[in-house]
Image (cartoon, rainbow, N blue to C red):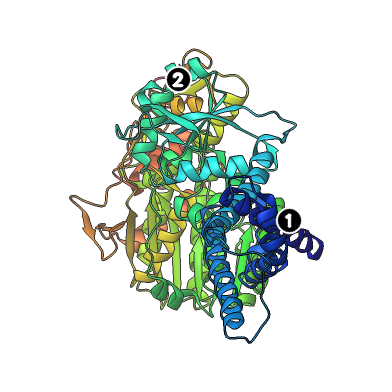
């Protein structure tokens, strides 16, 4: 650093001397050297250089990195030059006046010094210093090594502040990673203008034509303030280009310097389906978590692990992680240890259906709040293994909920699903029975029991997005069950945050429903993911329809407005008005179905579940057309039970 600053001072000294010489050459029209070199130029040169070096160093201009010169640096140079001009002018006339008063000898040998030299030197100093700096910047931007991966031709979609920042940063990179070819923007006032030497070539609708004409390799969506709907519209316009998409961090982060072009990333499906950040009542959530022992079941899963991350932000006294899968528990533990070094957390490998093990954990840790995320969630898998849905989703929930009652938990939160609404699947019905059980428990102890329902979350294990991503990577085809299949989507962090908010709002016995936004057609999602991968739907990657799987609906029924749903103070959370059930009868039915979970057939289990959940709609077996479903009486008779 010291050597670089010393070199900068030397370079400035040479430039100041050259500027002083140029000022005299221009003042005397490059003639009459004997009139100015010895009389004025040489005597005043040390003074001129010393004054300017002193002023520039005092203003810190010598510390500027020349390769990053900007308008701000130009203004700094101009201010320093202007101050140097006044200092020089003052010293010159002070010496002249002292001579006239007889206080000093004549400062110069010649007569008639041209005052215009000072103005020419002022302008020359700015021109030479700024010119030298811009030359260094230009050299670094134009004469650079190309990155090992090459420098693809980049077309920017958008011509606003973010795009300008992006190009500026691209030009500053020490190695050439991208070659910008221009911009596209829908603002007619911008079309035809130039930014950093690159043209705004036309509207975004012309993207395919421009890509072919300029041999574009990649597209950069430089519109960080665009809504999700606008982003989807841009992606739809780019279908058929066969190019990969990239995007920028938020514009305020770029302008504030919190992010740079090095953070350019691939456009993810979250950018199209994700929503604005959730507004949370931090104080209300903090009161329900801070300095309390919080237990999370299914802590290694997609939702459970995110719940742990969100809970950790509110400084619980201790976070207890319960998970059956050893590796998942190990991974989330390592992440928490790294991200929250002050957090005390305890990992327990435990099966929620193991009553003795669950009670041991509760007895030892005495949690105040329980978030129950552990569950079997895959609809087709549970259709083929209904007994496991009974044991894990119903019996496991009952074991954990009963332990919460027994060991004095303040609150128990069940994370449920939209598939519990008028269920058509074993999985959805098992979650509805779990909801009914914990609702029945509410008021029978000091524990508050709460249920929170939401739909699909982006990127969770086993969800459609990682499946599509894998199918695209293998070259297709991408399989969609039905052209009219519709789902709601929410990001994992958003869902987890709203669960915390709903739990903090609850007084017990409530089923909360989260606002999942607008439904998305799965086939449209598949096309967008293929496009984002730089491929063309139905050309490079085929889309095949495989038929609705057992237990699936064409659309899920999840609304926070309408009949049976009331609003809360939070715009994204509603309350589902459920009907009370006979708890003792429910418990007896649950006892019986759990005791026979490993012996009853799929159809027998489904018949029993329908007796508990009358709205359960049986929609056929996985082997083919709907099979006749025996009644519960027939099931009991066949198994030697009393009717």
2 or 1: mark nearer the eye: 1
Q: Quadrant of residue 296?
A: bottom right
CA gap between label 2 and label 1 equals: 48 Å
Secondary structure state at the residue bearing disc 1: helix
Residue occupying the point 68% across, 67% down: 109
Please tell me which residue lies in front, 547 or 125: 125
Pointers 2 and 1 in contact (C-beta within 8 Å): no
Is 370 on the left or on the right of 275, as rendered?
Answer: right
Secondary structure state at the residue bearing disc 2: helix
Mark 1 neighbour density, 10 Å: few (under 14) some (14–19) many (20 or more): few
Is 17 on the left or on the right of 491, as rendered?
Answer: right
Please tell me which residue lies in front, 589 or 15: 15
Is 289 on the left or on the right of 617, as rendered?
Answer: right
- The answer to whether residue 546 is above or below residue 93 is above
Task: Return the x and y of residue 406 as percentages of the image width and height.
Answer: 51, 75
Task: Return the x and y of residue 529 as percentages of the image width and height.
Answer: 49, 29
The residue positioned farthest toward the top in the image shown: 539
Is 153 on the left or on the right of 206, as rendered?
Answer: right
Task: Return the x and y of residue 492 as percentages of the image width and height.
Answer: 49, 51
**Residue behind mark 1:** 14
- The answer to whether residue 17 is above or below residue 479 is below
**Residue behind mark 2:** 210
Please tell me which residue lies in front, 97 or 584: 97
Mark 2 neighbour density, 10 Å: few (under 14) some (14–19) many (20 or more): many
Residue occupying the point 66% across, 76% down: 106
Residue occupying the point 32% across, 36% down: 617
The residue positioned farthest toward the left in the image shown: 563
Query: Who comes first in sequence, dot 2 or dot 1?
Result: 1
Task: Return the x and y of residue 567 as percentages of the image width and height.
Answer: 23, 60
């Amino acid at each position: 650093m010291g050597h670089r600053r010393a070199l900068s001072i030397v370079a400035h000294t040479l430039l100041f001397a050259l500027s002083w010489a140029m000022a005299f050459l221009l003042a005397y029209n490059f003639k009459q050297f004997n009139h100015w070199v010895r009389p004025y130029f040489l005597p005043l040169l040390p003074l001129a250089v010393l004054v300017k070096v002193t002023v520039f160093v005092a203003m810190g201009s010598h510390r500027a990195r020349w390769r990053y010169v900007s308008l701000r640096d130009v203004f700094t140079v101009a201010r320093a030059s202007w101050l140097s001009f006044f200092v020089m002018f003052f010293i010159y006339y002070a010496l002249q006046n002292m001579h006239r008063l007889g206080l000093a000898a004549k400062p110069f040998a010649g007569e008639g010094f041209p005052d215009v030299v000072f103005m020419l030197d002022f302008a020359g100093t700015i021109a030479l210093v700024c010119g030298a700096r811009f030359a260094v910047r230009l050299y670094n931007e134009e004469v650079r090594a190309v990155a090992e991966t090459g420098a693809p031709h980049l077309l920017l979609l958008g011509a606003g502040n973010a795009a300008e920042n992006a190009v500026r940063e691209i030009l500053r990179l020490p190695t050439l990673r991208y070659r910008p070819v221009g911009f596209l923007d829908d603002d007619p006032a911008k079309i035809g203008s130039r930014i950093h030497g690159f043209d705004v070539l036309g509207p975004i609708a012309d993207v395919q034509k421009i890509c072919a004409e300029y041999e574009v390799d990649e597209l950069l969506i430089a519109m960080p303030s665009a809504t999700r709907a606008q982003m989807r519209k841009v992606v739809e316009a780019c279908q058929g280009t066969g190019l990969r998409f990239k995007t920028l961090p938020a514009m305020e982060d770029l302008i504030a310097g919190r992010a740079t072009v090095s953070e350019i990333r691939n456009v993810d499906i979250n950018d199209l389906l994700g929503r604005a950040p959730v507004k949370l009542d931090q104080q209300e959530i903090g009161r329900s978590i801070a300095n309390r022992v919080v237990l999370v079941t299914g802590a290694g899963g997609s939702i459970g692990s995110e719940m742990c991350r969100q809970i950790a932000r509110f400084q619980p006294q201790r976070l207890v992680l319960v998970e059956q899968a050893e590796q998942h528990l190990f991974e989330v533990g390592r992440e928490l240890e790294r991200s929250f070094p002050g957090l005390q957390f305890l990992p327990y490998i435990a099966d929620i259906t193991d009553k003795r093990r669950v009670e041991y954990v509760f007895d030892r840790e005495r949690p105040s709040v329980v978030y129950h995320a552990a569950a079997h969630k895959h609809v087709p898998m549970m259709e083929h293994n209904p007994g496991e849905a009974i044991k894990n989703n119903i019996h496991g929930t009952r074991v954990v909920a009963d332990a919460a009652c027994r060991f004095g938990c303040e609150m128990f939160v069940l994370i449920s699903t939209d598939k519990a609404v008028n269920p058509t699947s074993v999985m959805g019905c098992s979650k509805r029975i779990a909801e009914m059980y914990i609702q029945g428990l509410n008021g029978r102890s000091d524990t508050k029991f709460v249920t929170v329902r939401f739909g699909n979350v982006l990127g969770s294990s086993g969800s459609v997005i990682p499946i599509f991503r894998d199918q695209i990577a293998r070259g297709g085809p991408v399989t969609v069950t039905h052209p009219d299949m519709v789902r709601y989507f929410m990001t994992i962090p958003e869902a987890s945050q709203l669960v915390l908010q709903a739990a903090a709002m609850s007084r017990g016995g409530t089923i909360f429903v989260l606002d999942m936004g607008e439904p998305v057609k799965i086939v449209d999602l598949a096309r967008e993911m293929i496009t984002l991968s730089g491929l063309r739907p139905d050309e490079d990657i085929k889309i095949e329809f495989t038929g609705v799987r057992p237990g699936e609906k064409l659309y899920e029924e999840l609304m926070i407005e309408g009949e049976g749903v009331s609003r809360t103070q939070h715009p994204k959370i509603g309350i589902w008005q459920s009907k009370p059930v006979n708890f003792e009868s429910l418990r007896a039915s649950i006892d019986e179905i759990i005791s026979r979970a490993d012996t009853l057939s799929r159809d027998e289990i489904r018949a029993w579940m329908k007796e508990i959940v009358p709205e359960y709609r049986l929609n056929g077996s996985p082997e083919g057309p709907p099979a006749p479903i025996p009644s519960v009486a027939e099931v009991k008779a066949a198994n030697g039970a009393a009717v």
